[in-house]
């Protein structure tokens, strides 16, 4: 009995909290010196509005609150990357580079963080290595401190060039595990992935749970395993859709995670992150106290309450927790997209069949995590398999590319029969997909030379040629008009490009 007790104590001693000094007797709990402070990344300026209202927040709705946000004591503000780049130009008539510079001018203390899809950057295909390097260089040069690099398949080769350039620019390299559930995504597989990320020079590891599937029990084991393998700071990213995220963060922090991604309350919950204020309050006075004063969050919350009102027409209310996420194990965005697509095709009665087809498609494709772009690829194939009444009868180009290896190596072996159906006699590539793409920067510089005024314009053009061509000349014409008082002549010239 005594022996057993000792063994149990020894096991407990391995927890990260073990070995702390007990709070001094008689001393008020809140006065005790915290040994380990939990840190907060605020997502209001990127993921929160991307998740809640289709990435539509304007820079002008951010500027008035930035200085107050800088006083809060956040570890970082996520404000760039993901869908913001495209959305800025396509829907808001804003230059994403200008947004970055503007926010940087107002934020002096907090670090600015961005999300980068590895070789995909912030676009929708893989780009050449020279584009990846130039993009990272300009992102850091314009003010990004922390770059979170991920790949939909967790294929490290797709993260390699971006990671190397982040290090070269002297920024913080956060390498990111795309979390998913499958027979091959074991604790060993994830912690081994983290170990290799550390070898690649990662300064910290993020666990990106895009669907909100990570539960507190698994999070605890995952954090402890990654910590043990890497010793690096760990940042947790989840979405509230399934209702698990706050519990998961708490368990993860207790197990040794260092930073969590939260959103100020008016922009929190639903498909967004857990509320910042609740996390701060939950940890107050304990060992993991964030050091953030709730009072400092009040003006930020008040401000974003009004902002939310202005975008309320774009918010699709999921009505609390969506348990379909837990039932089908897919991200909320993917679920609502599929519902919309099926409704448009007057086949909503097939929803259950499509949901049941997703695991079949994923298995054949080697269990890709479901995040852009794999969520679209898997969702489309599952829908086709159901609506055509025959599996793999119609295979879209993207699925073929996937089976040819152009998205990277799948986590598990591909189904050889399905692969044969998809690619016929073509030979799949086995090298790093980026190697197959010839340098693109020089052509882009030439193509954008007639209207581009800043070096970043060539990058914008490569990623979104049509949008950039429409947007940038107009933008410059506007500013020239403003600066030197030229009128219609400049406008006409711009439209002629
Ligand atoms: Co997210």
Image: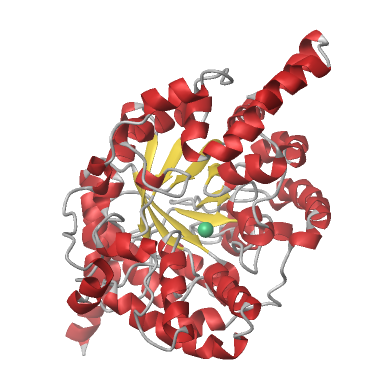
Residue in the picture at 20% in, 72% down:
420
Q: Quadrant of the C terminus?
A: top right
Q: On screen, 390 above or below 274?
A: below
Percent x, y for residue 356?
43, 87
Percent x, y for residue 398?
38, 61
Percent x, y for residue 62?
72, 40
Q: On screen, 263 above or below 144?
A: below
**Based on the displayed image, in which of its 4 quarters is residue 374 positioned?**
bottom left
Question: How many labels, in total?
Answer: 0
**Residue 361 shows in the view:** yes
Percent x, y for residue 134?
39, 28
Q: Nearer the viewer, residue 38 or 204?
A: 204
Q: Nearer the viewer, residue 251 or 45?
A: 45
Horizontal relation, residue 313 to residue 438: left or right? right
Q: Nearer the viewer, residue 312 or 353?
A: 353
What colour scheme was applied to this rendering of the protein?
Answer: secondary structure
Residue in the picture at 80% in, 61% down:
313
Horizontal relation, residue 88 to residue 426: left or right? right
Q: Quadrant of the N terminus?
A: bottom left
Residue in the picture at 49% in, 84% down:
387
Residue in the picture at 31% in, 64% down:
400
Q: On screen, 278 above or below 92?
A: below
**Residue 99 shows in the view:** no
Q: On screen, 322 above or below 35?
A: below
Horizontal relation, residue 1 to residue 473: left or right? left
């Amino acid at each position: 009995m005594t022996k057993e007790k000792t063994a149990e104590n020894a096991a407990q001693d391995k927890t990260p909290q073990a070995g702390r000094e007990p709070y001094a007797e008689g001393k008020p709990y809140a006065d005790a010196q915290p040994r380990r402070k939990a840190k907060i990344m605020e997502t209001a300026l990127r993921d929160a509005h991307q998740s809640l209202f289709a990435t539509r927040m304007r820079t002008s709705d951010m500027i008035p609150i930035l200085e107050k946000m800088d006083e809060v004591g956040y570890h970082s503000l996520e404000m760039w990357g993901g869908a913001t780049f495209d959305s800025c130009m396509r829907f808001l008539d804003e230059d994403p580079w200008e947004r970055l510079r503007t926010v940087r001018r107002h934020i002096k203390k907090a670090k600015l963080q961005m999300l980068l899809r590895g070789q995909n950057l912030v676009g929708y295909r893989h780009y050449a290595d020279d584009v990846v390097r130039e993009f990272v260089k300009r992102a850091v040069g314009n003010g990004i401190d922390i770059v979170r690099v991920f790949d939909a398949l967790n294929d490290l080769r797709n993260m390699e060039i971006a990671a190397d350039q982040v290090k070269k620019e002297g920024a913080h390299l956060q390498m990111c595990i795309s979390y998913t559930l499958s027979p091959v995504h074991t604790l060993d597989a994830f912690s081994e992935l983290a170990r290799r990320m550390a070898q690649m020079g990662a300064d910290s590891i993020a666990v990106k749970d895009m669907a909100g599937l990570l539960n507190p029990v698994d999070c605890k084991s995952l954090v402890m395993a990654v910590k043990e393998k890497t010793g690096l700071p760990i940042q947790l990213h989840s979405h509230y859709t399934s209702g698990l995220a706050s519990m998961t963060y708490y368990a993860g922090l207790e197990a040794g995670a260092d930073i969590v991604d939260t959103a100020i309350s008016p922009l929190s919950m639903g498909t967004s992150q857990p509320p910042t204020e609740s996390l701060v309050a939950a940890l107050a006075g304990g060992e993991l106290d964030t050091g953030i004063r709730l009072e400092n969050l009040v003006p930020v919350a008040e401000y974003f309450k009004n902002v939310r009102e202005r975008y309320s027409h774009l918010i699709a209310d999921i009505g609390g927790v969506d348990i379909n996420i837990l039932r089908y194990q897919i991200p909320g965005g993917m679920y609502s997209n599929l519902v919309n697509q099926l409704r448009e095709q007057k086949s909503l009665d097939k929803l259950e069949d499509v949901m049941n087809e997703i695991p079949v498609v994923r298995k054949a494709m080697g269990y890709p995590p479901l995040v852009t772009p794999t969520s679209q690829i898997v969702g489309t194939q599952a829908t086709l398999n159901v609506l055509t009444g025959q599996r793999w009868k119609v295979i879209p180009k993207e699925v073929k590319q996937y089976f040819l290896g152009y998205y990277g190596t799948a986590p598990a072996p591909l189904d050889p029969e399905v692969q044969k159906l998809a690619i016929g006699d073509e030979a799949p590539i086995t090298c790093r997909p980026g190697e197959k793409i010839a340098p693109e920067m020089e052509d882009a510089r030439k193509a954008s030379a007639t209207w581009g005024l800043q070096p970043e314009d060539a990058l914008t053009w490569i990623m979104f040629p049509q949008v950039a061509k429409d947007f940038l000349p107009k933008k410059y014409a506007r500013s020239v008009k403003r600066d030197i008082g030229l009128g219609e002549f400049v406008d006409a010239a711009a439209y002629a490009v």
